[in-house]
Image: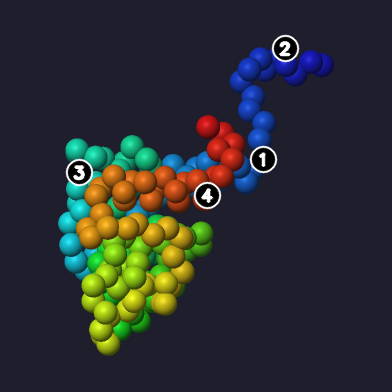
Amino acid sequence: MDLGKFFGDTILTTRMKDLVNWGRKYSLWPMPYGTACCAIEFMGAVSAMHDISRFGAEVVRFSPRQSDLLLVMGTINYKQAPVLKKIYEQMCEPKWVVAVGACASSGGFYDNYSVIQGIDEVIPVHVYVPGCPPRPEQIMDAVIKIQKMIDPKGALD
């Protein structure tokens, strides 16, 4: 029996891993962890003007158990570090982290005893977004970079 005649072009063959990664790529659930000005720029990224939902990151969650993308925006001091680590640990696998802005990436201009000089001292970071504060387009670019990490070949696009 010729299955091509029977089913026509209604069958798609692929690997399960590619299908799952395609689904993950377009259904990121970001959790904003905002402590300073960069969090205000994130509000711009999710607003109607820029609309981050076009890139599949529409469902913003405020629970780490429901998120797979952690956006750390702003200054993190040593007192907050255990809280940030706990939030990261509560997220389910697979999970990704974006350090948004100069403060989250490198401590910014707060070069003192109380501020962590980059959140990568506490949790792993996948994408760094430069700027003080970065523009909403840069935050969306970080989401696109995470998508490319999830599905580097773009197998089903």
Query: Which of pointers 4 and 3 lies earlier in the amino acid sequence?
Result: 3
Mark 1: which amino acid?
Arg
- Secondary structure of the residue carrying tag 3 is loop
Q: Pinpoint residue 8: horizontal percent, then vertical percent.
A: 66, 15
Quadrant of res 19:
top right
- In the picture provided, is 49 more to the left or to the right than 53? left
Query: Which of pointers 2 and 4 lies earlier in the amino acid sequence?
Result: 2
Residue furthest right in the image: 1
Mark 4: which amino acid?
Ile
User: Between marks 2 and 1, how big is the CA–CA gap?
Assistant: 23 Å
Residue of label 1: 15
Residue of label 3: 47
CB under 8 Å between callouts 4 and 3? no
Label 3 vs label 2, nearer the camera: 3
The answer to whether residue 157 is above or below residue 128 is: above
The answer to whether residue 143 is above or below residue 85 is: above
Q: Pinpoint residue 5: horizontal percent, then vertical percent.
A: 72, 12
- Secondary structure of the residue carrying tag 1 is loop
In the image, 69 versus 127, the foreground residue is 127
User: Between marks 2 and 4, how big is the CA–CA gap?
Assistant: 35 Å
Residue 150's disc number: 4
CB under 8 Å between callouts 3 and 2? no
Residue of label 2: 5
Q: How crowded is mark 1: few (under 14 residues within 10 Å), some or many (20 or more)?
A: few
Q: Pinpoint residue 85: horizontal percent, then vertical percent.
A: 39, 76
Q: Residue at x 64, y 43 (%)?
A: 16
- Secondary structure of the residue carrying tag 4 is helix
Mark 2: which amino acid?
Lys
The answer to whether residue 118 is above or below residue 23 is: below
Query: Which of pointers 2 and 1 lies earlier in the amino acid sequence?
Result: 2
